[in-house]
Structure formats: C-alpha cells, structure tokens
Amino acid sequence: MYTYLALGDSYTIGEQVPMQENFPHQLVNHLKEQHLEVSAPVIIAQTGWTTDELATAICEHNIHETFSFVTLLIGVNNQYRGRTVENYREEYEQLLRQAIIFANGHTQNVFVLSIPDWGATPFAEGRDRERVAREIDMYNTTCKDITEAHKCHYLYITDSTRQNGAQPAYLAADGLHPSAKEYAIWVGKLTPMVAKALKQ
C-alpha cells in the first residue's frame, strides 16, 4: 500500500469543492485505476497559508513517518501579500528539502505543482492582472529552478488556470478557486508522472 502526503494551501485542500474532488483525492483515485493501491492522502494544507505558515504547520503536526510520494504546491499567498521572490526562494527551498525527507530521500518521488494565476479569475476584477501574472511567473521560475536543482518533478499547471480562469465550469462558487473540473486537468498530467515513479 503506497502512502501519500500532500502539502500546500487552498489549492491542495480544494477550497469550496467537496473533499473527494480536490486534486489529492482525485489523484489517488486515478492511481488506483492504474492498479496502484494508494491509501487516502494525508493533507497538511489550509486556505491562506504562505510558505512560513506551512512550515510552522508541518512542525506542529510532528510527523515522523515517511511516505511513498509527496506533492507540494505553495506560494500564491506569498505573492498575494506582496512578499519578495527572494523571501519565497529561501522558504520554498526549506519546504522542498522537508518534502524530500518525507519521501525518505527519494527526490524522484516529490512532485511540485506550479502556482495557479488567480489574476485570470473573476475575483481579480479591478486588479492589475498583468502585474499579478508577471509576479506569479517570477515565483514559478524560482520554484522550477529550485525544484529541478534538487532533482524533483515540476509540473506546470499555470497555463491551464489562465486559459480556464474566466470559465465558470472551471471555477468554484467563489470565482477564485478551481472547480473539480480544473483539478481533473492537473491530475491528468500528474497521474502518469507519479505512476511511473512508483513503478520504478
């Protein structure tokens, strides 16, 4: 039985969607369809968390076991609160190192998702959408560079959130967070990556 730890913020818990429709639960279901027995995901995530808040929560959970694989998606709230990319770089790298420890040192079993662009959603009406996109691109470039330097997997899903950001079917009721349909797109890309790593 494979085990799975999901670390993140609102995009990991699936704000405004039923728990079974967030991306970690959808991922487990898809892996089971690939004949990989995966237990229910352990999720450490909360809406609004920044990198340092996630790090604090990880310490508070005091997890001692390791997991077959780990996902990490964090940083949108750093950008939203106007924090610097330099601050993100330092705190994100610490989180990634922790994720690798949770994966028992197996870097190939750590999967990082890029930060979605909330500026493409109706929630961002009246905001400087181009600035938001620019800053998220900077965050994601930093995230990708660090992730690949540590030989972990990086999955870019930001383009999907930009393409679908104004379409109600791909949004939760709040006009900000993704719907199950958007998460399904991420999972469609993530499933083969995780399945391949687990089968090696």
Image: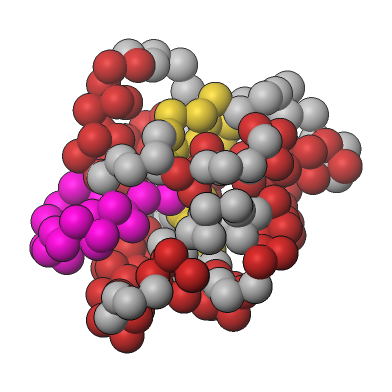
The answer to whether one can see residue 145 in this image is: no
Query: In the orientation shown, which residue stands out farthest toward the bottom?
Result: 130
Left or right: 183, with 100 as reference point: right
Residue 25 position by quadrant? top right
Who's the residue at 15% across and 62% down the image? Answer: 82
Would residue 79 be counted in the magenta stretch? yes
Dominant SS of magenta comes to: helix
Left or right: 87, with 51 as reference point: left
- Classify 1 as above or below 109: above
- Classify 143 as above or below 135: above
- Classify 196 as above or below 185: above
Who's the residue at 47% across and 34% down the image? Answer: 103
| Residue 68 on image: x %, y % | 58, 31
Who's the residue at 28% across and 68% down the image? Answer: 139
- Classify 92 as above or below 105: below
Give the camera-side residue of 128 and 148. Answer: 128
Residue 181 position by quadrant? bottom right
| Residue 71 on image: x %, y % | 50, 44
The answer to whether one can see residue 181 in this image is: yes
Who's the residue at 39% across and 74% down the image? Answer: 125
Give the camera-side residue of 103 and 156. Answer: 156
Would residue 77 be counted in the magenta stretch? yes
Total marks in image: 0
Left or right: 31, with 125 as reference point: right
| Residue 1 on image: x %, y % | 73, 22
Left or right: 4, with 153 as reference point: right
Residue 138 position by quadrant? bottom left
Stretch in magenta? 73-94
What kind of colouring is applied to the model shown?
A: secondary structure
